[in-house]
Every structure is written in structure tokens, then in C-alpha cells.
């Protein structure tokens, strides 16, 4: 197994998706190659942190406005279709006052 092949198998290795023989071969390479072992450990830690700590991520109103403005600037054909919806009702809560 080459270094490039081993590197490509790190994701499935960390997820436990490799067949036993391939996993054993990759483990022996990890013991022999410090850089490859570091990559595997970093990937495992990153995936664990993403699974644990990621709550709902909500874009700010300012970011949405900038993204929408850039979308319309870069795609003028889309701006005409949304011109009728000048009032951003998708951001208003459906609460009657």
C-alpha cells in the first residue's frame, strides 16, 4: 500500500468502515509513519469535535443581506424574478400583534 493510498483510506479508517485486512495493513503503516498517524489522529479529533459541538448554525441578517445582494449582482436574471418580493417576508415571524 502506497502512502497516497493509505492517506485516501484515513476517512474510512477513522469511521471504522474498512475491512479487517485493510485496517490491519493501514494500522501497521500508521505505526511506521509519524506524519500519517498525525493525519489520522487529527481527522479523528476533528470529526469528534464536529459531532459533539455543532449546534444549529444560523447566519446573521447582515450576512444574509450581503449574500443575497451578491447573488443578485452576479446573477441579474434572478434579480428580476425576486423584484416582486421586495418585502423580505421570509424573515418575519408569523405573529399577529
Image (spheres, rainbow, N blue to C red):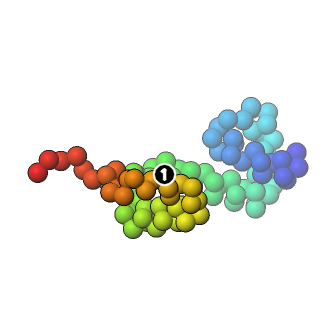
Label 1, secondary structure: give it: helix
Residue 89 x %, y %: 31, 52
Q: Residue at x 63, y 54 (%)?
A: 43
- Of residue 41 and residue 89, the one placed in the foreground of this image is 89
Q: In this view, does 93 lie to the left or right of 64?
A: left
Instruction: Report which residue position mark 1 lands on.
Output: 81
Residue 54 x %, y %: 44, 52
Residue 70 x %, y %: 53, 66
- Of residue 31 and residue 95, the one placed in the foreground of this image is 95
The quarter of the picture where the N terminus appears is top right
Q: Is residue 8 left or right of residue 69?
A: right
- Of residue 17 and residue 27, the one placed in the foreground of this image is 17
Residue 47 visible (yes or no) = yes
> Would you place residue 22 above or below residue 62 in this image?
above
Residue most extreme to the left: 97
Q: Which residue is drawn at 34% across and 56% down?
A: 88
Q: Is residue 20 left or right of residue 62?
A: right
Q: Residue at x 72, y 48 (%)?
A: 10
Q: Residue at x 80, y 57 (%)?
A: 33
How many labels, in total? 1
Amino acid at each position: 500500500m502506497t502512502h497516497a493510498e493509505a492517506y485516501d483510506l484515513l476517512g474510512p479508517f477513522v469511521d471504522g468502515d474498512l475491512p479487517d485486512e485493510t485496517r490491519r495493513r493501514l494500522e501497521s503503516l500508521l505505526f511506521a509513519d509519524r506524519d500519517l498517524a498525525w493525519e489520522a489522529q487529527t481527522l479523528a479529533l476533528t470529526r469528534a469535535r464536529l459531532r459533539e459541538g455543532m449546534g444549529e448554525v444560523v447566519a446573521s441578517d447582515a450576512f444574509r443581506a450581503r449574500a443575497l445582494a451578491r447573488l443578485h449582482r452576479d446573477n441579474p436574471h434572478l434579480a428580476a424574478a425576486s423584484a416582486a418580493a421586495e418585502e423580505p417576508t421570509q424573515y418575519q415571524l408569523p405573529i399577529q400583534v
